[in-house]
Amino acid sequence: MHYIVIGAGPAGVTACETLRGLDPTAQITLIGGEPEPPYSRMAIPYLLVEQIDESGTYLRKREGHYADKDIEHIRMPVTRVDPAQRSVTLADGNSLNYDRLLIATGATPLKPPIPGIDLDGIHNCWTLEDARAIVERAKPGSPVVLIGAGFIGCIILESLVERDVKLTVVEKGDRMVPRMMDNVAGNLLKSWCENKGVRILTSSGVVGFTELGSGLSVNLDSGESLSADLVITAMGVRANIDFLAGSGIETDQGILVNDYLETNREDIFAAGDVAQGRDFSSGMDMVQAIQPTSVEHGRIAAVNMVRDGSIRHQGSLNMNVLDTLGLISSSFGLWMGVEGGDQATLLDESEFRYLQLQFDGDYLIGASSLGHTQHIGVLRGLIRSRVPLGEWKERLMRDPTRLMEAYLGSVQGAS
């Protein structure tokens, strides 16, 4: 049996290790599109502030890890998948045949058609190659413009502040992290960052980039122009599916998969940021570009590749935890609520503390928080349990901080 896994991120690496554990004699090939060992993009901010070196970003630190597990690692992009021939074609023209295939190719940063976006000095912060370029230009005191204040942007923001640059953040939305926080929390986070010396421009769009001496000019829709030695774009990502054109594998925002993470083509599976699978909260098929989902997908897909659909994917819970200059924020499930649902909130603007719970009938379905860390992890259990809260709903409506008591009283059946 030859298993091929395309994509050397968390989903792909987890899948390969799971495959080896379940099928000790199989041939396993891991194909990554970059010339690096498999690494975590989430570790790049730590590299930027020199808390780790490049080897610290590697998903598996021990040298020879993949060889010891008899996992062949090929460092070359895949350009074509042919389900009829059960083969994948590499960038050098060579082809490999598979018995079962997992596509875990992740996502690519969006590159909007803004005039001048290809100028020197404009980078994503997505790969180790990007990180090297940012370290070269992000010197203390240098003007840097970060475009995008979403989840990825806010992670990058902290590392740039620690590099002591003069930072301006431009966000098209009316608040920071608009896909994770409501107006109250997003604008509290904005105030927090501004108090730390970061200029935040929300409801602002970039209309073009031009060269300005040895640097760049970032031209905004307000008419203002920002000078920068470095521009970092963090305007979202899209699934890496272009190479599947003509394969017959069904795609939408990502690769469409069933409850076993199988595609519409026999013996081909998908996992991670490229897979459009079931969302726990909504029941809809969605791309969920977060690392916990990638790891979960990789494990489930691998088990089903070996054991023919023995694990049903129940849906991944959308959740994010973010540390922005020392202020912890989080969101879980349907944090924006549902029509006709109830909401409980607790707000202390002076202390940058906010807690919001969302209910659908007798069930907790979502939550978001800012500045609260105690028992926040319990929110995941309360939402995933789908247990009626009973009298605990009213108690939480009056005091949203009683999360642990609600978990013990409703989910674990304590009195």
Image (cartoon, rainbow, N blue to C red):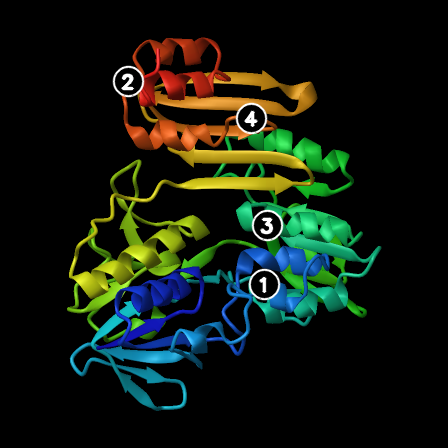
Which residue bears the numbered disc 3? 153
Which residue bears the numbered disc 4? 374
- Which tag, 1 or 2, sits closer to the chain's start? 1
Numbered label attached to residue 57: 1
Secondary-structure class at tag 3: helix
Secondary-structure class at tag 2: loop
Work out whether 354 lies above or below 4: above
Residue found at x 30% / y 29%:
385
Given this view, does label 3 or label 2 mark the residue nearer the observer?
A: 2
Q: Quadrant of residue 300?
A: bottom left
How far is mark 4 from mark 1, CA to CA? 29 Å
- Which tag, 1 or 3, sits closer to the chain's start? 1
Work out whether 30 lies above or below 344: below
How far is mark 3 from mark 2, CA to CA? 35 Å
Which residue bears the numbered disc 2? 361
Numbered label attached to residue 186: none
- Asked whether disc 4 touches disc 2, contact meaning CB atoms under 8 Å apart, the reply is no
- Which tag, 3 or 2, sits closer to the chain's start? 3
Secondary-structure class at tag 4: loop
Q: Is residue 124 visible?
A: no
